[in-house]
Image (spheres, rainbow, N blue to C red):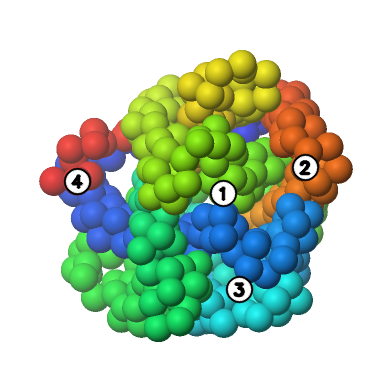
Amino acid sequence: MSDVRKDLISTHTAPTLDVADLNVIGKVYRRIIPFLLLLYAANYLDRINIGVAALTMNKDLGLTATTYGLATTAFYVGYVICEIPSNLCLAKFGARVWLGRILLTWGLASSATAFVGGMYSLYAVRAVVGIAEAGFVPGIMLYVTYWLPRSYHARANSLMIMASPTAMALGAAISGLILQHANGALGFAGWRWMFFIEGLPAIVLGVITFTYISSRPHEAHWLSEDEKERLNTIIEKDKKSNPRALSAVSKSVLRQCFSKDIILLSLIYFCFVNTISANSTWIPTIVRGLLAKSSSFSLIGAVAAIPPVCALFIMPFWARSSDRRNERRWHLVYAMGLSLIGWLLVIIAPRPEFKLLGLCCTTIGAFCSQSIFFTLPQAILSDEARPLGIGVITTIGLLGSAISPFVIGYLKDLLGTFSAGLYYVAFLLAIACIMTLCVSGGRVKKEIAVAPVQQLTR
């Protein structure tokens, strides 16, 4: 049993999948992952567009860097309060109903941001957006575990999380265009049009979700009875090949969710999620500082899109490497380390092009970290504990997202520079790297065979 305690997943050999099994998994992959990617993109767009809006909204509403940071904090406060209840509701009501509800309500609330009249109404609306959106990301990660074996989780997570840099890149560029060219249309400021327009995709996708996805394999009308039975067999065999998760079944849900490794993972997520929050909240403002001579919001948006585009190219290779090598912990440490180096470049590099390189490094590291991170709790927790356990991790972690914008904004107002706030983010990444090395080993020496990408996408 000592070996089991040392490994996140036992070295027990799982059965190999045959061609028919791989065909079923490929069919599931093609059906759910692209759609989840779309949902994730809409989610991230509504979360990060406030960073572009800040370029003109702050002046219109009389916001300082501190009070603007509090608007983002208000979003995460609402999100954190409702995170665990929302994740439990998804397990109870099913992903089809609950994800559809989340998309509809947050889309409506996000579009309503266009009508705020001042600082306090902005705080109230952003808090409502956070409440409406709560549970979406952990719910998506939980949903994947119902449909795919562990040896596909990093790749599936990566493909979905690729929606974040995609939304970040396209959102920055499109938001910049709206900000510049829609300003004054029908008497509305450009940032108001941006919020209104960019909330609509979530509303449309919410309606589609009610009819497109199935909560569990046995409900999937697009699978034959033989395919449903085969997929259930694959998932059950996968569970039995993971003694760590099986041994957890004998423990209470609370004991699993507050074990040493889950607490460590919660603290790690708290530390590195600050980087994701800083990226989405402050990169447009930082880029504007690098392009001080330019007044073009379109150019600012285009340059702000460069770091997430770089992340898009690297993420699939990083997730594939983790799946192929059956290794999670060091892939997470290296990715967070790259992000740490990136922030230090942004802080100390003397030339704008090196600062931009730093932004690219920190964005690549942040999203690669996120794609690997959620494979760890998925491997530790039993089915019964997974909704609560992932909710606990994301709730504690997202407290970092709530605190970070305020801290960075306050230090910016106090010292007149972003450097102090970015040192804070870099320090937390260093702590996260150290804590990750304290988590029980993240290697699987042999796992269910993984199909090549072509098998999944053709």
Marks 3 and 2, Cα distance to the nearest angstrom?
26 Å
Dot 4: what SS?
Answer: helix
Q: What residue type is labelled 1?
A: Ser
In terms of sequence position, does the residue under pointer 3 or pointer 2 come before the other?
3
Q: Are marks 4 and 3 in contact (CB under 8 Å)?
A: no
Indicate whether 200 appears above or below 425: below
Tell me the quarter of the picture where residue 440 sits: top right
Q: What residue type is labelled 4?
A: Thr
Dot 1: what SS?
Answer: helix
Question: Mark on residue 412?
Answer: 2
Question: Mark on residue 129?
Answer: 3
Q: Mark 1 points at which residue?
A: 280
Indicate whether 341 appears above or below 278: above
Q: Do the residues labelled 3 and 2 touch (CB within 8 Å)?
A: no
Q: Name the residue under label 4.
A: 457
In terms of sequence position, does the residue under pointer 3 or pointer 1 come before the other?
3
Instruction: Point out the frontmost of discs 1 and 4.
Output: 1
